[in-house]
Image: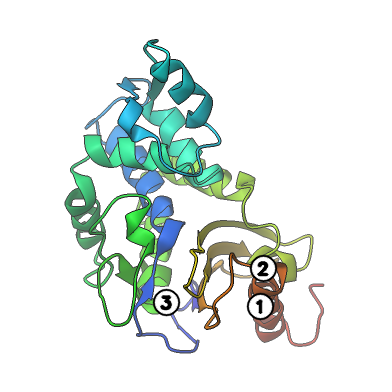
C-alpha cells in the first residue's frame, strides 16, 4: 500500500517478483491516453483486427473477430481498444495495441520513462501469464507497480484530461467486484485493474491493483499479487476473498477507529 500523501509504502514481500497477468493493461491504457494527449496518436484513429488476433477472453473484440473470420473488415479505435483492455480486460484488444505501440519492449520503455526500472513485459496475451519459478519475464513487484500507478495518476504523470479518463475507467472496471474493492467501505471511491491466470496443472494467480480515495485524506494505491499455491482448475471465489480481506486490512489501517466507515 502506497500513501500518495507522504509516499510511504507498507506491505508484505514488497520487492519479490510476481506475474503481472492483466494488471499490465492499466499501464497500457495509460500509455494510449498519454500518447494521445502528447500528440503521438489520435484516439479516434482506427486499428484493424485480424483473424490471428483471436485469443481467449474477448468480450469486446470477439463478435468483431467473428466478422473478420467471415471476411468482413472490422476496426476499433485506440480509445475503444484502451477502454476495453482496462474495463473488460479484453486480450485481443491488448495484443492489437501492443502491435501498434512498439510491442512488449515499447510498453516496458514506457514504464521506464516514468521511473519504473523493475516492471517488464516480454510476451503477448495469453503467454505472458505463464510465469513459473524465478522466470523474470512479464513480472513486477508490489512496490514497483504501486509506485508506477501512483506516478501515472499523480500530478507529474499523465496530463490532466488523460488522468481523469483513466481514473474513471478504473472506477468503471467490471472485473474486480470480488477483490480489493469488496473489502472497502461502500462509500469510498475506488477503481482497479485485475489480473488472473488459471491453467490445468498450475496454481492460479489472482491479482488486483487499486486506486483508492478514502474520505478526507490523500489517495492510496494498493498492489496485491496472490499466487494461490495449490493447483486448481481456475481461480475460485475463496481466492478472490483473500484480496477482499486485503481491502479490509487497508481500510482498518488507514481508519483504525472506523470513523470514516
Residue designated by label 2:
236
Residue 135 shown left or right of residue 188 in the figure: left
Q: Tell me the number on the disc at residue 242.
A: 1
Lower position in the chain sequence, tag 3 or tag 1: 3
Lower position in the chain sequence, tag 3 or tag 2: 3
Residue 206: give x, y in percent of width and height.
54, 69
Chosen colour scheme: rainbow
Residue 122 shown left or right of residue 236 in the figure: left
29 relative to 64, above or below: below
Helix, strand or loop at mark 1: helix
Residue 248 shown left or right of residue 218 in the figure: right
In this view, the residue in front, 258 or 67, is 67
Point 72% across, 78% down: residue: 248
Lower position in the chain sequence, tag 1 or tag 2: 2
Number of numbered discs visible in the structure rendering? 3
Mark 2 crowdedness (10 Å alpha carbons): few <14, some 14-19, many ≥20: few
Marks 3/2: CA distance?
22 Å
Asked which quadrant contains residue 255, the reply is: bottom right
Residue designated by label 3:
142
Is residue 37 among the parts visible in the rendering? no
Helix, strand or loop at mark 3: helix
In this view, the residue in front, 221 or 62, is 62
Is residue 61 among the parts visible in the rendering? yes
In this view, the residue in front, 116 or 178, is 178
Asked which quadrant contains residue 137, the reply is: bottom left
Q: Nearer the viewer, mark 1 or mark 2?
A: 2
Residue 28: give x, y in percent of width and height.
36, 48
Point 49% across, 89% down: residue: 12
- 3 and 2 marks in contact (CB < 8 Å): no
Amino acid at each position: 500500500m502506497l500513501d500518495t500523501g507522504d509516499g510511504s509504502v507498507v506491505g508484505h514481500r514488497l520487492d519479490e517478483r510476481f506475474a503481472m497477468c492483466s494488471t499490465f493493461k492499466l499501464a497500457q491504457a495509460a500509455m494510449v491516453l498519454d500518447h494521445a494527449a502528447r500528440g503521438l496518436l489520435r484516439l479516434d484513429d482506427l486499428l484493424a483486427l485480424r483473424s490471428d488476433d483471436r485469443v481467449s477472453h474477448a468480450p469486446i473484440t470477439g463478435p468483431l473477430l467473428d466478422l473478420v473470420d467471415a471476411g468482413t473488415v472490422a476496426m476499433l479505435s485506440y480509445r475503444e481498444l484502451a477502454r476495453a483492455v482496462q474495463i473488460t480486460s479484453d486480450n485481443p484488444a491488448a495484443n492489437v495495441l501492443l502491435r501498434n505501440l512498439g510491442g512488449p519492449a515499447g510498453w516496458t520503455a514506457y514504464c521506464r520513462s516514468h521511473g519504473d526500472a523493475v516492471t517488464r513485459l516480454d510476451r503477448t496475451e495469453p503467454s505472458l501469464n505463464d510465469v513459473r519459478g524465478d522466470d523474470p519475464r512479464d513480472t513486477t513487484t508490489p512496490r514497483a507497480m504501486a509506485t508506477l500507478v501512483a506516478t501515472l495518476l499523480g500530478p507529474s504523470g499523465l496530463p490532466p484530461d488523460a488522468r481523469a479518463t483513466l481514473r474513471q475507467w478504473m472506477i468503471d472496471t467490471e472485473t474486480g467486484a470480488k477483490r480489493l474493492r469488496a473489502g472497502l467501505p461502500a462509500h469510498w471511491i475506488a477503481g482497479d485493474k485485475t489480473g488472473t491466470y488459471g491453467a490445468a496443472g498450475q496454481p492460479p494467480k489472482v491479482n488486483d491493483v487499486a486506486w483508492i480515495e478514502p474520505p478526507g485524506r490523500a489517495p492510496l494505491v494498493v498492489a496485491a499479487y496472490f499466487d494461490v499455491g495449490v493447483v486448481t482448475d481456475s481461480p475460485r471465489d475463496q481466492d478472490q476473498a483473500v484480496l477482499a480481506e486485503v481491502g479490509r486490512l487497508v481500510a482498518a489501517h488507514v481508519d483504525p477507529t472506523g470513523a470514516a466507515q
